[in-house]
């Protein structure tokens, strides 16, 4: 997949882009969600969940590492910010999530880069305050 760059000027636009990703997602897709604190990773994740037909509230799994949601496909939403050693992921059955029937969305993937499959799609969200408080550049690919 070639790299694509999108501009978002509101939470609603960030949500809508995530929603489009969720609608197009297929079983086994792995999305790596990069970005600083407060850039909108959870808003984007909520959009992905909505696109997958998930009705329940989506929250960042910072303290539990993974939240599971049921929709058109299962969504496995990871936040690995607090992972000190990538091998800790195997204790929660990480391989079963990665190679299962659902969609994986992994926040802070740089914490576990060495155990991530090459086919995963990287999504980076960046602020650019020179373009306004709500502006985000979202790079996919």
Image (spheres, rainbow, N blue to C red):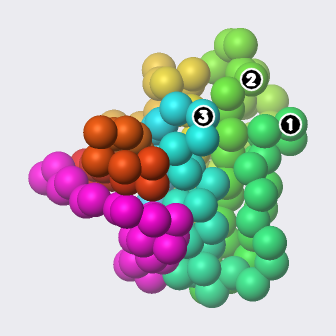
Q: Residue at x 37, y 62 (%)?
A: 9
Residue 82, horizontal then vertical, whole percent? 74, 23
Name the image quarter holding residue 122.
top left
Label 2: how many residues lie within 10 Å, few (<14), some (14-19) or many (20+)? few
Vertical side of 115 occupied by 97: above or below: below
Q: Earlier in the sequence, mark 1 or mark 3?
A: 3
| Farthest left residue in view | 2
Q: Position of residue 119 (x, y in %)?
A: 33, 46
Question: Where residue 27 sits: x, y (%)?
Answer: 49, 70
The residue carrying pointer 1 sits among few (fewer than 14), some (14 to 19) or many (20 or more) residues within 10 Å by Cα, namely: few
The N terminus sits in image quarter: bottom left
The residue located at (86%, 41%) in the rendering is 64
> Which is more foreground, mark 3 or mark 2?
3
The range drawn in magenta is 1-24
> Given contact means CB atoms under 8 Å apart, are the residues at marks 1 and 3 in contact?
no
Residue on which the image places disc 2: 82
Please name the residue shown 63% across and 54% down the image: 42
What residue is shown with label 1? 63
**Contact flag, marks 2 and 1 (Cβ < 8 Å):** yes
| N-term mark: 2 or 1 | 1
| Image position, residue 33 (x, y; %) | 48, 45
Which secondary structure lies at badge 2? loop
Badge 3: few (under 14), some or many (20 or more) residues near its Cα, within 10 Å? few
- Which marked residue is nearer to the observer: mark 1 or mark 3? 3
Q: Tell me, for residue 37, which label it has, or none.
A: 3
Q: Between residues 44 and 129, which one lies in front from this camera angle?
A: 129
**Horizontal placement of 41 versus 139: left or right?**
right
């Amino acid at each position: 997949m070639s790299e694509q760059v999108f501009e978002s000027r509101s939470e609603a636009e960030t949500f809508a882009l995530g929603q489009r990703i969720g609608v197009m997602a297929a079983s086994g897709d792995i999305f790596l969600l990069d970005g600083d604190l407060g850039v909108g990773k959870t808003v984007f994740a909520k959009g992905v969940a909505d696109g997958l037909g998930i009705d329940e509230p989506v929250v960042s799994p910072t303290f539990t590492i993974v939240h599971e949601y049921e929709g058109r496909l299962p969504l496995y939403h990871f936040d690995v910010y607090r992972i000190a050693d990538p091998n800790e992921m195997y204790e929660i059955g990480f391989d079963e999530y990665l190679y299962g029937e659902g969609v994986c969305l992994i926040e802070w993937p740089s914490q576990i880069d060495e155990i991530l499959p090459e086919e995963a799609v990287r999504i980076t969200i960046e602020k650019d305050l020179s373009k306004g408080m709500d502006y985000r550049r979202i790079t996919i690919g």
